[in-house]
Amino acid sequence: MTDTKKQLRIALRNCGLIDPEKIEEYIAQDGYFALGKCLTEFSPEETIAEIKKSGLRGRGGGGFPTGLKWEITNNVKAEQKYVVCNADEGDPGAFMDRSILEGDPHSVLEAMAICGYCIGADKGLIYIRAEYPLAIERLKIAIKQAREIGLLGNEILGKSFNFDIELRYGAGAFVCGEETALIHSMEGLRGEPTFKPPFPSVSGYMGKPTNVNNVETFASIPVIINKGASWFNKIGTEKSKGTKVFALAGKINNVGLVEVPMGTTLREVVYEIGGGIVNGKEFKSVQTGGPSGGCLTQNFLDTPIDYDNLVEAGSMMGSGGMIVMDEDDCMVSIAKFYLEFTLEESCGKCTPCRVGNKRLHEILEKITEGKGTVEDIDRLKVLSNVIKDTSLCGLGQSSPNPVLSTIANFENEYLAHVEDGKCPAGQCKSLLRYDIVEDLCTGCTLCFRNCPVGAITGERRAPHYIDQSLCIKCGVCFEKCKFNAITLT
Amino acid sequence: MNTVSLIIDNKPVVVKKGTTILEAASGIGVHVPTLCHMKLDDLNIENKPGGCRICVVEVEGRRNLAPACCTDVHEGMEVNTHSLRAINARRTVMELILSDHPAECLICAKSGDCELQDMAQQLGIRKIHYPGEMSTYREDTSPAIIREIDKCIMCRRCEMMCNEVQTVGVLSAINRGFSSVVSPAFEMNLDHSECTYCGQCVAVCPTGALTEVDDTGKVIRALSDPTKTVIVQTAPAVRAALGEEFGMEPGTLVTGKLVTALRRLRFDHVFDTDFAADLTIMEEGTELLNRLGKHLAGDKDVKLPILTSCCPAWVKFFEHHFPEMKDIPSTARSPQQMFGSIAKTYFADKLEIKRENLVVVSIMPCVAKKYECDRDEFKVNGNPDVDHVITTRELAALIKLSNIDFNSLPNEEFDNPMGESTGAGVIFGTTGGVIEAAVRTAYELHTKKELPRLDFDELRGMEGIREATIDFDGLPIKIGIAHGLGNARKLLEDIQAGKSEFHAIEIMSCPGGCIGGGGQPYHHGNAEILKKRQMAIYKEDKNKTLRKSHENPHILKLYEEFLGKPMSEKAHHLLHTEYFDRTE
């Protein structure tokens, strides 16, 4: 079981504990108390000061100080402003936002209202992917309930503060998690990013100042108001305060969501909370930061997790994906896998991301097929750095991270592919070779009869032979042989 | 503080706040290369998606490279436009673009006039280090425009033109990542879309992805057919731009050389669309006065303002977008089609040949004219009034192909009867010209007095929407002018909302009018070229002895011998048309 002592639930505080379809249960957990406190005790500026003091940074991946973002938006003078909740959770395997929206939707609504109060907005929009039907359903219920008892709508809690929230549905494009792309998508335009500045806080949805925060960021707000910034900023590291939710996945015994204080080490997450590697295999790498994060080796296991340490280590916080890999994983294939994702999800607007990632992927494919050269590794590095340096948005600026970090940390594996024609993890099929050891083969014909492509020939009771040009490396012969006469190299 | 001090390539610069690195650099003679960026000064047209990433420069202290075209300068900024890092990145990005671009330069329509080719040269690309799979798309041919999307580099200029400037909304980016491409919705063919064929996408495409349909072969075949009499008309804007194709300064008038070249191409008669423009004024001006007269007499059914109808892209635009207003534009055919109609009746009769044996070729600054001549209402028993349309660019190619040294040609005069024109016909080539020509005639027909002046400066210029009130001897006539379909849309929406007070509105689809047409020599984003062409047009007008359409003796003779009077039944049959609702 998960070691719960290492965990601290702030964003997930109510998930699984209350009935998300009953506003009373949320209220019973001090729900909407923070909103009331802000409206009655704090001015918007004081509230912003509190959030700034808490040290909360954006949980969507960027890590931008939340209070500062609110302050900037508040300082822009405009008739109409918007609060947007980014619920376009797109990292493969990540589902922290979904869990919060399904398990505690009011925490997000409350925080959005607080944000609206702080920046002078009376309208909130939640951009949520349409693939989250239950989250949508629960949000609808929550919005309706909050309106019914006057926690959304006009003159909230009898104050001259109006705020209401609407849902906007996304079609699941990863790039729409980028705030400018998200805003374009909400406006009915093609979901692709534009150059910043102007930042949304100055010119966002419909050209109006817009504050965009991620679900987990919002979910942390009411607690900060209730318990105070000084309580919150005691948790975590010097520059990263509070907790972070991670979606633990891969070759680990306890998969699922975990919420830990910033500064917890990767080792604690992997071995203590995650319960170590499946089947007692050897840990090889942990990939953080979603598809464009980096793969870290065991050298980084004792690194305290925070925004800056992860970047320094060559990865990033991202929205909190954490995928553990063991000795059976080929790091070249892993890099290729992530690139396949970004390739698919690139919007195609800027050249380096559109064409550069395609070329990176092609080179990786060449390497995993055993056709790569040492020069290809250099080309990967050079091209990766140019893509990072020249791409328009965060997607392209980080998409080569899996390539660069696997080369940096596992260069020997790349070299094994290109110099020796071997995949050390035995994952790259093109580089596998099945042979029959003459002395051990009894000529039972079992392999011959099971080979799906007729690559095995030989007389009964005489040693058999595999035609390498026909072999598709399916491994059936290897599994069927009762005499261990087939080797895999 | 409204100024910003910074350093670019070791040079201190002081610029206005809000200036981009690109503009600041250009001010001190540092020309950062760009590809997707395009700005037409004074026309309010700018494309800066920041997509190509060719213009990246190194900014001291910044994590990544900055796109110069869309990064504003800030105080104390230190920019290095040609550091090793910037050059390497720029060249790598260029290699990436080229790695997905067919290397068909030798046989590409754009070869020698291609911004991508120039940029590859400028950046010294000699090898592509990142070869790989290339995008493949089918070619899309329409009556006017060919899309060879394999050659698209996603600069999005066409999309900006189609959506923001023209508000036609046909072209947009579809698909994602490496499969992204600019296309009509659902990868529909252009001829199934609401494309107006204005050709502004072609005019701004930096590569050969969008080009005009090449009809030079048809013209060469017609000219080689001994059974055909082949005549040619040339639009006003052509003479103000053709010289550019032969290395002349923009704004050089080449009317005389143009006539000589056409004669040497062995056209049997070299005529002028300006003649038909004068004819258009007779019809359209009369129509305006008729409608105006009824309106002043209190007729509630009469529709005002009257809208010009010379521009085929504009016609197709309102047929798609404002079909309920199709009774507002003048019913007068465009000058090209009036010419064709008169050529195949009046002139064919004079030559005593059948219309089938007379081939009418147009030289147009426009690609939409290719579509216009193909419209069914401009055909008699399947035989079109205008057989072939070639653009200014195609004519230049034809001249080169026919071994004619254009620059050394002597000046010759147009043939008659359809070569005589007035200055009023000439100014059809620029925004504001048609309505100015109409005013010159309508004023005199209405007031029976001579115009006190001929230059109406209040109707001229490059502002997207202009308005002026012209005093018709005590009767104030309110005139509106729009160029660019987005501007036209605004005036139409005003009419729809009952807010328009204009009596007459001139609309041209292309920014600048025909001088900026999709068939003209490429301006490559230099708006100065358009302004120089406009000046050339007004110069030609000024040089003319006759400057009012109703004084063109051959027009008067045409009415006398053939048409009767403006808006006569015969004129109606030959010179007017109807419009269709294309929303179904």
Image: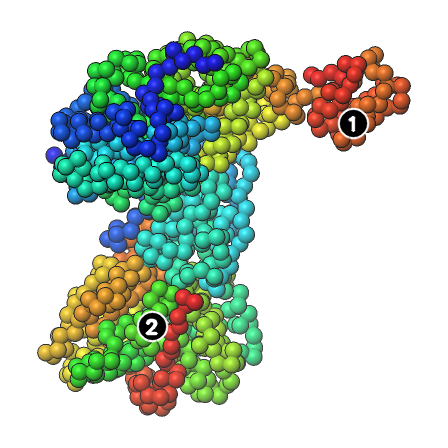
Q: Is residue A60 above or below residue A265?
A: below
Horizontal side of residue A459 vs A159, given as left or right: right
Residue A75 placement (x, y as % from top left): 16, 33
Horizontal side of residue B317 vs B286, given as left or right: right
Residue B75 placement (x, y as % from top left): 19, 30
Give residue B346's quadrant in the image: bottom left
Crowding near the residue tagged with mark 2, few <14, some 14–19, many ≥20 C-alpha atoms within 10 Å? some
Disc ID at residue B326: 2
Residue A128 placement (x, y as % from top left): 37, 38
The residue at the far left in this view is B474
- Which colouring convention does the figure follow? rainbow
Horizontal side of residue A387 vs A481, given as left or right: left
Crowding near the residue tagged with mark 1, few <14, some 14–19, many ≥20 C-alpha atoms within 10 Å? some
Query: For the residues tagged 2 and 1, is the chain the same?
Result: no
Type of the residue with mark 2: Lys
Look at 46% across and 41% down and name the residue there.
B176
Look at 34% across and 16% down and name the residue there.
A8
Indicate the secondary structure of the residue bearing disc 2: loop
Instruction: Identify the subunit bearing mark 2.
Output: B
Look at 21% across and 19% down and name the residue there.
A228
In the rendered image, which residue does mark 1 sit on? A450
Mark 2 and mark 1: span between their CA atoms?
75 Å
Instruction: Identify the subunit bearing mark 1.
Output: A
Indicate the secondary structure of the residue bearing disc 1: helix
